[in-house]
Structure formats: C-alpha cells, structure tokens
Image (cartoon, rainbow, N blue to C red):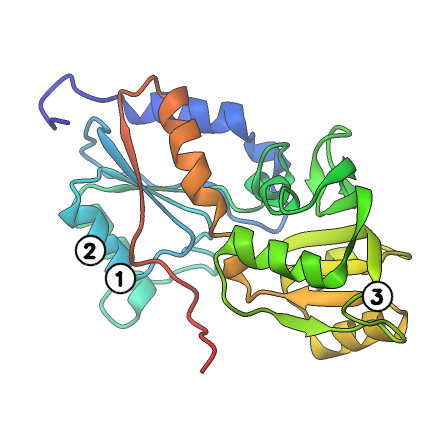
C-alpha cells in the first residue's frame, strides 16, 4: 500500500470509526483514552499498528513497517509529563512519534466495556448461554467485566485448557476454591481482562474468577469463599483480542488501510 498523496484515510476518518466502535464515553472516568498524540504536520493514514503496550521497540517497529498511526490499548501517557526530553522511556517514545509524524490513539477501558470488546473476546473461551456486565455501563450490553452462565457445566480442568487456548499460553496460575478440585464442575464464570480484583469483588457467588492479575489478599478471599481463580498475567488476558480486531477494523475502514499487529509486544513477565 503506497504512502502517496490521496492513499489511505485522513486521521479524522479513522478516529470516527474507532469512536463508532467504542465511544470514548464508555471509558472509566480515571482513564486517559482517545487521541493522545497528533503530529503538527499530519499525514494520510495508510498503515496502523495495533499493540497492547507501547514500548520503544514497538515504536521502532511502527516506523520500520511504515505506519502513520499506532493504536496502543494501554495509554502510554497516563501520569502528566512535565517535560519531553530523553530522561525516561515514555518521554523518548513521545519525542520519537512526534518526530516521525506518527499519531497515537489509546482506547483502554472503552474497549473493555463495549459489546464485542476485550472482555467479550475473553468470554468466548467458554460455552455460555448468558453474559452480563458485572458493573453495568451506559446500557445493558456495556460495562466492566462479564458474568457468564454456561450452557452446560464444564470441569475446572477444561476451563483452564480453554483459557490457555484463547490466550496462547502454556501456563496459567490457578487457586483452587476452598474444598474444590480440578475436576469439579463450574456453571458460572466471572471475568475481567487486565487487573480485575476491584471488579470481581462485586460478584458474591460464582464458581470461577478469571483475570490477568489480582492482589494476593483478593485471591485468598475468593479461594476461602469457595471460588477458584485463574490468573494469566495482566496483558496476556487482553493481547489476544488484537489479532481478531485487526481484521474487523480493516473492514470498518473499507480496506483502505492496512492494520498490523505488533510482533514485538509481549507481557514483561515470563515463567521460568
């Protein structure tokens, strides 16, 4: 796809489709979402790079791939920046993107909340008959987390296998609920991509909690209440959404833009 004048779409056209999919109003009030960087001299957008986390290596990957825009699920600009110099990796990223005229957009919790977003992708690991937000949003289909009622019960062992398959992980962490075993049948699953402890606390009864990370005492509390917990690592509960969404976004943009998924992006934690 050429970077020549007239190819691709204007930035505002891309932003319109992103907002159509997940309006900014779905974001949590504390979050920093939307368009975060807009170069002074803009370019037509012909290639977009999707990433879960924006690191310096991902920024370099975007330039090497000829991308004029990065969509970073997590906002790399969160705490206020008092200067943009070379003293921290986040400042270097901002400087690099502006120098190379690469726009930056971050959806974060709006993609968590929206129907068909990150939490619904994670929920697709299970054969459910009903899925409702744990904390309702602006309408019945949006909100934080998902509470699933399964069509038929599955063993906890099968649930672990399903989570590994959808995330592409070889290992996850498991806390067995008090008095429970790996072969016990589960009928309900409460999940929240990322760091789900504060959301999952709102679920009184359930057979299984699934999230990326939780505080030790939150895991302990759930287990003592008889609820088993699966932890994947924070971003590993989110990243797999990008692969499927890349083709959805390319479709929404009438195939006038090539949507790539970062090959450099990965969770900083590994099991050794």
Residue 202 visible in the current orientation: no
Residue that extends furthest to the front in the rendered view of this protein = 183
For label 2, count other residues whose C-alpha is less than 10 Å away and answer few (under 14), some (14-19) or many (20+). Answer: some
Q: Secondary structure at mark 1?
A: helix
Answer yes or no: do the residues labelled 1 and 2 have beta carbons within 8 Å? yes
Q: In the rendered image, which residue does mark 2 sit on? A: 60
Residue in the picture at 23% in, 42% down = 102
The answer to which of marks 3 and 2 sits earlier in the sequence is 2
Quarter of the image where one finds residue 86: bottom left
Q: In the rendered image, which residue does mark 1 sit on? A: 56
Q: Nearer the viewer, mark 1 or mark 3?
A: 3
Q: Nearer the viewer, mark 3 or mark 2?
A: 3
Q: Secondary structure at mark 2?
A: helix
| Figure quadrant of the C terminus | bottom left
Q: Is residue 263 above or below residue 119?
A: below
Q: Which mark is residue 227?
A: 3
Answer yes or no: do the residues labelled 3 and 2 have beta carbons within 8 Å? no
Q: Residue 226, image x and y in percent?
A: 88, 69
| Figure quadrant of the N terminus | top left
Label count reads 3
Q: Residue 140, image x and y in percent?
A: 78, 29
Residue in the picture at 77% in, 72% down = 218
Q: CA distance from mark 3 to mark 2?
A: 43 Å
Q: Is residue 35 above or below residue 196?
A: above
Q: Is residue 67 above or below residue 227?
A: above
């Amino acid at each position: 796809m050429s970077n020549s004048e007239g190819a691709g779409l204007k930035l505002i056209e891309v932003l319109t489709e992103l907002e159509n999919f997940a309006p900014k109003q779905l974001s949590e009030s504390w979050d920093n979402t939307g368009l975060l960087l807009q170069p002074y001299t803009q370019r037509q957008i012909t290639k977009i790079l999707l990433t879960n986390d924006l690191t310096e290596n991902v920024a370099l990957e975007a330039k090497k791939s000829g991308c004029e825009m990065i969509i970073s699920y997590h906002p790399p600009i969160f705490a206020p920046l008092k200067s943009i110099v070379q003293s921290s990796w986040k400042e270097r990223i901002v400087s690099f993107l502006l120098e190379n005229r690469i726009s930056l957009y971050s959806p974060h919790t709006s993609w968590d909340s929206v129907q068909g977003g990150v939490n619904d992708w994670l929920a697709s690991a299970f054969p459910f008959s009903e899925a409702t937000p744990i904390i309702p949003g602006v309408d019945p289909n949006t909100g934080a987390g998902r509470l699933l009622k399964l069509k038929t019960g599955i063993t906890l062992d099968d649930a672990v296998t399903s989570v590994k398959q959808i995330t592409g992980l070889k290992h996850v962490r498991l806390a067995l609920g008090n008095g429970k075993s790996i072969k016990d049948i589960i009928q309900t699953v409460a999940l929240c991509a990322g760091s789900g402890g504060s959301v999952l606390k709102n679920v009184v009864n359930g057979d299984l909690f699934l999230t990326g990370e939780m505080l030790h005492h939150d895991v302990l509390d759930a287990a003592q209440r008889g609820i088993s917990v699966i932890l994947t690592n924070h971003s590993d509960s989110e990243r797999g959404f990008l692969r499927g969404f890349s083709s959805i976004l390319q479709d929404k943009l009438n195939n006038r833009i090539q949507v790539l998924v970062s090959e450099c992006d990965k969770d900083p934690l590994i099991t050794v």
